[in-house]
Image: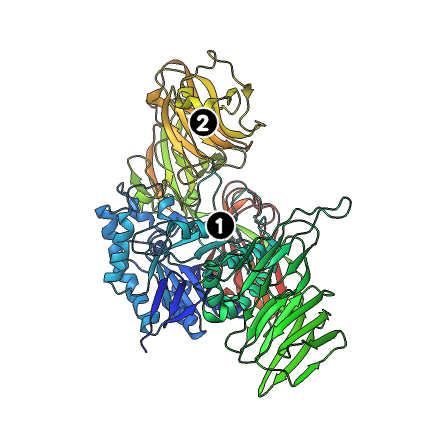
Amino acid sequence: MNATVRVGRQGIELDSRPFYLLSGCIHYFRWPRAEWRPLLEQARWAGLNTIDTVIPWNRHEPQPGVFDFADEADLGAFLDLCHDLGLKVIVRPGPYICAEWENGGLPAWLTANGDLRLRTNDPVFLSAVLRWFDTLMPILVPRQHTRGGPIILCQIENEHWASGVYGADEHQQTLARAAFERGIEVPQYTCMGATPGYPEFRNGWSGIAEKLVQTRQLWPDNPLIVSELWSGWFDNWGGHRQTRKSAAKLDMILHQLTAVGCAGFSHWMWAGGTNFGYWGGRTVGGDLIHMTTGYDYDAPIDEYGRLTEKALVARRHHLFLSCFGAELSSVLADAVPGGITVIPPAAIAGRSEGGVQPYRTVRAGPTAPPAWRDFCVTFLANPGLEAVTYEVFGPGGDHLSIEVEPTSIRPIFANLPLGESGIVILGHTGRILGYWPDQGTLVIYGREGEQGTLLLRLPTAPDGIHAHDAGVTVRVGLDDHLLRVDYWLTAEGRRIEVAWEDHALLIELLPQALAERYGSQPLPSPTRSHRTMLTTRAFAVVEATDETGWQPITEPVALEQLGCFYGYGWYRAELELTTPLTTTLAAPLLSDRALVLVNGDFVGVLGVSPTGPRYTLPISLPAGHHDLRLLVDNLGRFNYGLNLGERKGLLAPLYLAGSQEDISAGWAAYWQEVQFAGEAVANIKPWAARPDADNVHLGRFAWAGPMVWLIRPIEVQAGRRYRVHITGDRNSGAFFVNGTAVERFSRHRSGGLIAADITDLLQPGVNTLALQILNYAGAPWRATLISYDASRPLPARWSFRAGVTVSDQSAPPTGPAFVQATFARDELPARLQRLAVRPGTLDKGQIWLNGQNCGRFWQIGPQEDYKLPVSWLTTHNEILLFVEQSRSGAIELVWAER
């Protein structure tokens, strides 16, 4: 039989057999190659049958025509390893991938010297994409399931409808056709792309089951598959640690997906990994929404490959669905109301809140297979914080009292066939882990001490029943094919053996702790963390003082245009002053941050900062020759929205007579009936209408509602240029100057960040700024106004140099430096599970282990420890930290053994 893959209304079929998709996303390039096998073995142990991965074009083609498929970028080797371990693969070649990855996976060199319409059929963009596909597809094509390999699905682009690039849907068709022409024959699909002729999968978290139902209503022949189940979230510098999505919520959502007939899902992420090097991107929102180095994602497997509570929750669902999902999903997708009578708990004053209802109660529809015609199920929900008891009456009249633990859903099945065994579960109170016909084993689990009942119908009357424990009662019904098991769960679990003719059934009754680890055991959890202080030495940075190797430039331009696509770059301005200069320098077009050195001395920082952006710097210089150097840091390009392809570095000269004003205060708020007034409100003059609140501070505005208009006057001078910088939450809305729209923003565009030159909309004197925010909920915003004299650029001779290099000279007392520490491998345990460096009071910079770039550090939270891959260790090891400012204090190794 030829190997085939088909995606239809009921889900995926492999070789004409239903395949329930149990997938987890692992990005091979975010994990050291030596960690691939343990990760994949762990994924298989957890019940996954598929690995989902994006393919970052920029990681594989960092320079035009220069390709890298070595080490952790060896895509072919990763796919082969998945195949060797019996795991299928979903590939997502983009070329746009998002993934919280630098520039969404698009190479920075694409937009270095021209403005392309990214993610469209722009001829220049498309030409580069097709050249990339010509290199990539020969790796993917021979590894398709249809050719004996692991690849079963290929995604078309990614979330194209959320790109902000509207009216370019044909781009997805172009990419799908290009992949097909180069040999992709497995099904291609979209997510948030809805392209005719291709299945549409869904992404999401809360409400994702309901989204699948909506999708089925819109497209009756579309499969109910979740391409990204967001069971965690990414961390950004200066933000809270993202741990808001609990294991209990994951449990409930997986039950909800099962309830509506979901045919498969992929965890985004299953194991997040690390943003090594300079590969962490940024996303829409405030000006500090740049990815941390740790891409832990609060995922089921943490950054160091350790199981979390979410992994154990997910494994229970994976085991159940691997047994029942393929048939159960199609029956539930077309089920109809009824079948089981459920009486929810009543509210009793002083004892029980009540008020809960089942999530879904249905029976098999008319199209169900014959063995499933009598099937019924109720998903008993309890979102509260104390257990509740439902009274359940099965179609056979059986009465079961079922307690549902807090923040949980408990599915209760009636007439559930156990494969082709002829055994049917008539009713139960415990949870079903799975049925394995090869071993003839049925596993039921619940809380330790739980009382339970299991009702079975056997093919024939049992001729032998053996219960291993006294806490179990087994009774044969009036119909001698019926079996009733009453039990209570112990810490060690219970076993019952039932035999008939030449068949046998083993029933295992387990507490949840044993059920989560049923079968082979995962790797043991590590011991507690240990810390080791390291002795350090500080060395100078070559580029801070070196006179050679500088590339002359007419004026500052973007890093990309200077061939510096990632990391740091130096802009040097040499001045010859005939008279002293005392002024405030302005850097209106700086992206993202810059350290400023004057004649070798550190004088300040420009750009984004946790305390607010700073684009001006006071400076006082005597007459004579001066050397001003700006070390500019690219913190990562947008991975989402319309600002893909943003340019980094110093994009324009420095200017004299700069000024910066915090304009977060002094706004007037209007919200009563403004939704009916529309953009006319943008023309309100602060003195011409009565505001609902006056003198509002954007960071302290305690109000919530569907829409608010915030109006503020500013006074400007003739002959100066003005830029506004506004940052806040990821709302939708618009920004106006004197009634003219400057920018319309949303969470899919530039939501939460506005940076614009507004000079041409201003007139000397008083002008009006208007900020419209939809669905405002009190989140803090901040606004800054920068002005400068465009006719007075800094009188300097400019040059450029890329990168930072360690010197063999001792570091000066201030400014950037390198901090070095060494340690021997035999100073640490042989079986390390986790190894990290803790920079302590060092402020910000980059980390290398034995010459390999481990990523950025920035001690503004939420990340404190930075992963050092154990596989990168040698006999004698060097940690080298590039430190931008503060280098007092010590660094520590943090480690744990298996």
Residue 561: x and y in percent read 30, 43
Whether the residues at callouts 2 and 1 have beta carbons within 8 Å, the answer is no
Nearer to us of marks 2 and 1 is 1
730 or 606, which is in the foreground?
A: 730
Tally of marks: 2
On screen, residue 482 above or below 629: below
In this picture, residue 761 sits left or right of residue 463:
left
Q: Amino acid at mark 1?
A: Glu
Q: Is residue 676 left or right of residue 358?
A: left
Nearer to the camera, 254 or 232:
254
Question: What's the CA distance linking mark 2 and mark 1?
Answer: 31 Å
In x, y percent, where is residue 566? 38, 48
Q: Which residue is mark 1?
A: 210
In the image, residue 84 sits, relative to residue 754, either above or below, namely below
Q: Mark 1: which secondary structure? A: helix
Q: Looking at the picture, how far across and down is residue 441, in whole percent? A: 59, 77
Q: Is residue 615 visible?
A: no
Which amino acid type is marked by label 2?
Answer: Gln
**Between 647 and 41, which is closer to the camera in this rendering?**
41
